């Protein structure tokens, strides 16, 4: 009970910190919207009215408290640029982003675990060196370079010309595959090097432990050792990495993929909101990401207990 | 603590690492050439025709405005080193200071405050944070650098904190305390030097991350404003490749890849030398 309370208090402080920093950056120092909202030749009175509506005439503390209160009551308001309610924007964009990012995220981690296990199993031999060389190459490629390269190779007449160059007109599984393939491959390529490197280190660490040596001495087969002993006992760091990269991949990764391919997901909506100073949208995205982070931390803690009864 | 001569011996045996160091050295010479005004000074001259193919006058061809892509990609080496050095040095120093304070005063309010700040910064999606800082400080040339420094220190901070907590119970620190040396003196003279290997490795990792982030930010319009960088060249090329002009893309991405590969190979060799348990011997 005490543990749960301290976790909750910790989470609350984290959310407050995230909202404070995002408030300072995006609202206090954010772009002034007065003149985007108002027409030309406005008189001083109209300007003052708009500024009052946006809360620009209020002191810092007052505006921050309002900002947090709106977030906690889920009163997200409407976008300043389009007038669309923020809750509707989220409902419209988040499913697209999940559909866009999930295949690459899952495959990138599964392939990383598979390659990491293989490298750890053949540690020091040519397979390990080959996989290692492959990861370093992947880590040295910029996300943007990978995207442009795959786009040219797969979606233009200079390459195979199999997929649409950009966009997102998805209404059935076939069109989904058509639009999701190039972004998915890009995401896999950009994360695979780092994933493989991370998982290999975890598995190598685990393979060096006494219980693995004992299992080997008892004559357990390589496959049993890998899957039953190494993988199962490394689940805590593996889970941690997967869980904590979810919010970052979904927002940060989708920001670039969606702006590049012109996909109307949450990443593009967020980027547009940053550049136009659309505070209600930013507030919702940053606030909800922070809340998601705290929830994920609590969920990860619960998962730890599930995979490793020693943690309590 | 492993001795320096042993580390150097390990490094010299690692051929990939040495190759990486050589690549970085060559790029550094190119950057020095640009700094001293010998190389790449005509990067903004629009002396050629539009999209000329590679040839004798323009080795890598020209871009939309008729600028020499070879000159631009060479000048960008300087931009990459400036971004990489400023961000990696400042973020590592910040991580060392905050991490060692948190580790030395562990479980005090200083530690809690630093851990809270780290937790907060880690919970904001990275590009979103960088974009917000770059936007909040718009017009400032250093917005991009500040955003990266503000987020990159957290990993170094976490590693240094853990190491300092280990070191502070060692005998030489206990005896320094016993003879009454002030905390900050012990920390800076006796504890921090023992985390140097972490700082060295983190500097190389931050260097790579900074150059990669610059590319993304420049594409998003939040990066380099004055001058030229591989990120800006790649941003230009996103439209050109669809029309079949690949010079900008190839020049920028190959130079970028070579420099990052050199740094990664060297960084790997450093990590293997300091932590042979993980190495693929």
Image (spheres, rainbow, N blue to C red):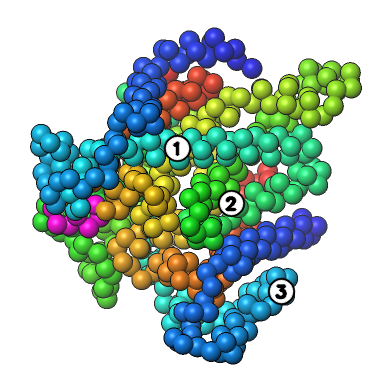
Q: Where is residue A238 in the image (x, y as percent from the top left)?
A: 51, 44
Q: Could you give the CA–CA distance between mark 1 and mark 3, rounded to whole angstroms?
A: 39 Å
Give the SS element for disc 3: loop
Instruction: Report if the CB atoms under discs 1 and 3 are less than 8 Å apart.
Output: no
Confirm whether circles 1 and 3 share one chain: no
Residue beneath the point at 35% across and 59% down = A257
In-image side of A281 versus B224 (left or right): right
**Residue of label 3:** A59
Q: Could you give the CA–CA distance between mark 2 and mark 3, rounded to whole angstroms?
A: 28 Å
Residue beneath the point at 36% across and 25% down = B29
Which mark is on residue B28?
none
**Residue of label 2:** B122
**Residue of label 1:** B82
Q: Taking A5 as reference, is A42 above or below it?
A: below
Based on the picture, tell me whether residue A303 belongs to the magenta stretch.
no
Of the image marks 1 and 2, the number of the one nearer the N terminus: 1
Residue beneath the point at 41% across and 47% down = B214
Residue beneath the point at 53% across and 89% down = A43
Specify few, some or many for label 1: CA neighbours under 10 Å numbering under 14, 14-19, or 20 or more.
some
Q: Where is residue B198 in the image (x, y as percent from the top left)?
A: 58, 28
Confirm whether circles 2 and 3 share one chain: no
* Magenta part of the chain: B237-244
Give the SS element for disc 1: helix
């Amino acid at each position: 009970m005490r543990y749960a309370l301290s976790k909750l208090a910790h989470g609350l402080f984290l959310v407050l910190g995230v909202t404070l920093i995002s408030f300072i950056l995006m609202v206090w120092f954010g772009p002034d919207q007065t003149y985007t909202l108002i027409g030309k030749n406005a008189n001083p009175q109209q300007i003052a009215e708009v500024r009052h509506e946006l809360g620009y005439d209020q002191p810092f503390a007052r505006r921050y408290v309002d900002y947090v209160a709106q977030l906690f009551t889920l009163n997200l308001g409407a976008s300043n640029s389009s007038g669309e309610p923020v809750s509707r924007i989220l409902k419209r964009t988040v499913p697209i982003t999940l559909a866009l990012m999930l295949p690459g995220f899952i495959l990138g981690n599964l392939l990383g675990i598979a390659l990491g296990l293989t490298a750890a199993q053949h540690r020091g031999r040519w397979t390990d060196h080959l996989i290692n060389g492959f990861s370093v190459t992947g880590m040295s490629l910029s996300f943007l370079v990978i995207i442009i390269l795959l786009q040219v190779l797969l979606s233009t007449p200079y390459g195979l010309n199999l997929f649409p160059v950009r966009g997102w007109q998805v209404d059935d599984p076939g069109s989904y595959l058509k639009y999701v393939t190039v972004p998915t491959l890009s995401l896999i390529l950009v994360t695979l090097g780092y994933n493989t490197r991370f998982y290999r280190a975890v598995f190598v660490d685990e393979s060096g432990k006494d219980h693995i040596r004992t299992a080997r001495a008892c004559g357990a087969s390589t496959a049993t050792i890998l899957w039953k002993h190494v993988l199962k006992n490394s689940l805590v760091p593996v889970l941690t990495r997967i869980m904590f990269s979810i919010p970052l991949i979904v927002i940060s990764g989708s920001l670039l993929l969606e702006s590049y391919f012109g996909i109307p997901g949450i990443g593009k909506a967020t980027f547009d909101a940053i550049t136009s100073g659309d505070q209600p949208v930013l507030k919702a995205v940053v606030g909800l990401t922070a809340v998601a982070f705290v929830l994920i931390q609590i969920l990860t803690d619960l998962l730890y207990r599930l995979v490793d009864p020693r943690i309590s | 603590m492993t001795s320096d001569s042993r580390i150097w011996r390990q490094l010299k045996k690692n051929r990939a690492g040495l190759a990486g160091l050589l690549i970085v050295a060559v790029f550094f010479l190119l950057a020095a050439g640009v700094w001293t005004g010998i190389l790449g000074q005509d990067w903004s001259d629009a002396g050629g025709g539009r999209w000329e193919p590679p040839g004798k006058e323009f080795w890598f061809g020209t871009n939309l405005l008729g600028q020499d892509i070879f000159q631009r990609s060479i000048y960008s080496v300087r931009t990459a080193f400036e971004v990489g050095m400023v961000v990696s040095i400042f973020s590592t120093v910040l991580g060392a200071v905050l991490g060692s304070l948190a580790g030395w005063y562990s479980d005090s309010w200083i530690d809690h405050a630093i851990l809270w700040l780290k937790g907060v910064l880690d919970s904001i999606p990275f590009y979103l944070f960088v974009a917000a800082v770059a936007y909040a400080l718009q017009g400032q040339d250093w917005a991009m650098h500040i955003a990266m420094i503000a987020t990159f220190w957290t990993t170094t901070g976490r590693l240094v904190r853990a190491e300092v907590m280990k070191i502070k119970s060692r005998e030489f620190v206990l005896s320094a305390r016993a003879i009454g040396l002030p905390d900050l003196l012990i920390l800076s003279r006796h504890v921090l030097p023992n985390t140097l290997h972490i700082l060295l490795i983190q500097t190389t990792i931050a260097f790579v991350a900074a150059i990669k982030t610059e590319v993304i930010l420049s594409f998003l319009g939040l990066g380099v404003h004055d001058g030229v960088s591989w990120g800006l060249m790649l941003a230009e090329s996103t439209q050109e490749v669809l029309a079949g002009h690949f010079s900008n893309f190839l020049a920028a991405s190959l130079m970028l890849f070579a420099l990052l590969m050199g740094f990664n190979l060297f960084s790997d060799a450093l990590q293997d030398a300091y932590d042979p348990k993980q190495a693929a011997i």
